[in-house]
Amino acid sequence: MENQFIRSEMLLTENGIKTLQNSHVAVFGVGGVGGHCIETLVRSGVKEVSIIDNDTVSLSNLNRQIVALHSTIGQSKVEVMKKRLLDINPDAIIHTYETFVLKDTINEIDLVGVDYIIDCIDTMVAKILLIEKAKEIQIPIICSMGTGNKLDPTKLQIGDISKTSYDPVAKVLRRELKARHIKKVEVLWSTEQPIKPMIPWEDNPNITKRNVPGSVAFMPNIAGIMLAGHVILQIIDKK
């Protein structure tokens, strides 16, 4: 029987693929970063994923999000993503949660048996709640910092939150984690200094405060693939 992962086995080994097929990764956020991250996990052999997002596809998502097509506008991001993933691997186990990460909702998300958490959320309160939860239940977590207002993918890197620079999201997160005495949080960030958008959001009626940062297709997508690659190698190495 033909094996869809045969090319991956050449690098990750047969045992590596089996390890991924027995792994469960939870990805929070199905946007520019999260969408490509989730797809890379499943294409690489991760059989079970939980995907969490309460948003629907909008026109402004078309420039960068893998779930965004004119035909999917208005649809649930997690449901669009689930359909896509099952078309990639019909044997995949996809758990969907249409919810925002809030203090009152985080315990509704079943993380039992999850091997790794990937945070691709764009709100600070949710990031902090998720990090606290991951530390509490001792599941490794990696968090995406900001890719908005940045253009150089070669400046993306992975390391401890304490090493970050030129990242407004990381700056706030460092302060909040320090206040909570939380250390050693792995993040993906960019050392590129943020670029000032050419058109201020105040001058454009089509831009809302929620999506103020300028964005391009390649930055969040590359970040998502990097996160997935890092987690894949970590899972194979640890098991």
Image (spheres, rainbow, N blue to C red):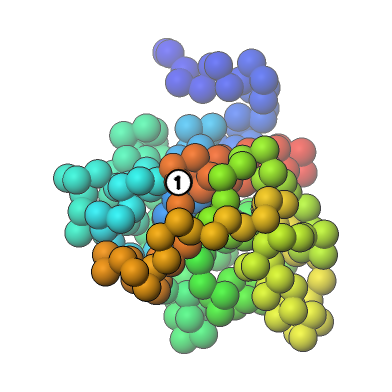
Would you say 125 lies left or right of 14 here?
Answer: left
**Which residue sits furthest top?**
1
Q: Quadrant of the C terminus?
A: top right
Question: In this view of the protein, which residue sits in the foreground, 191 or 199?
Answer: 199
Residue 106 appears anywhere in the view: yes
Q: Is residue 24 above or below residue 89?
A: below
Residue at the spot 77% in from the left edge and 44% down from the top edge: 238
Q: Position of residue 205 (x, y in %)?
A: 26, 69
Residue at the spot 76% in from the left edge and 60% down from the top edge: 165
Residue at the spot 54% in from the left edge and 60% down from the top edge: 196
**Which residue sits furthest left?**
71
Question: In this view of the protein, which residue sits in the foreground, 11 or 190?
Answer: 190
Q: Position of residue 97 (x, y in %)?
A: 38, 65
Q: Position of residue 229 (x, y in %)?
A: 63, 38
Looking at the rendered structure, the secondary structure element under dot 1 is: loop
Residue at the spot 48% in from the left edge and 81% down from the top edge: 102
Q: Position of residue 175 (x, y in %)?
A: 74, 79
Amino acid type at image mark 1: Val
Q: How many marks?
A: 1
Question: In this view of the protein, which residue sits in the foreground, 25 or 211?
Answer: 211
Q: Residue under label 1, please give it.
A: 216
Crowd around label 1: few <14 · some 14–19 · many ≥20 (10 Å): some
Would you say 124 lies left or right of 197 here?
Answer: right
Q: Which of the 4 image quadrants contains residue 127?
A: bottom right
Residue 113 appears anywhere in the view: no
Q: Is residue 238 above or below residue 44?
A: below
Question: In this view of the protein, which residue sits in the foreground, 41 or 77?
Answer: 77
Would you say 207 lies left or right of 167 here?
Answer: left
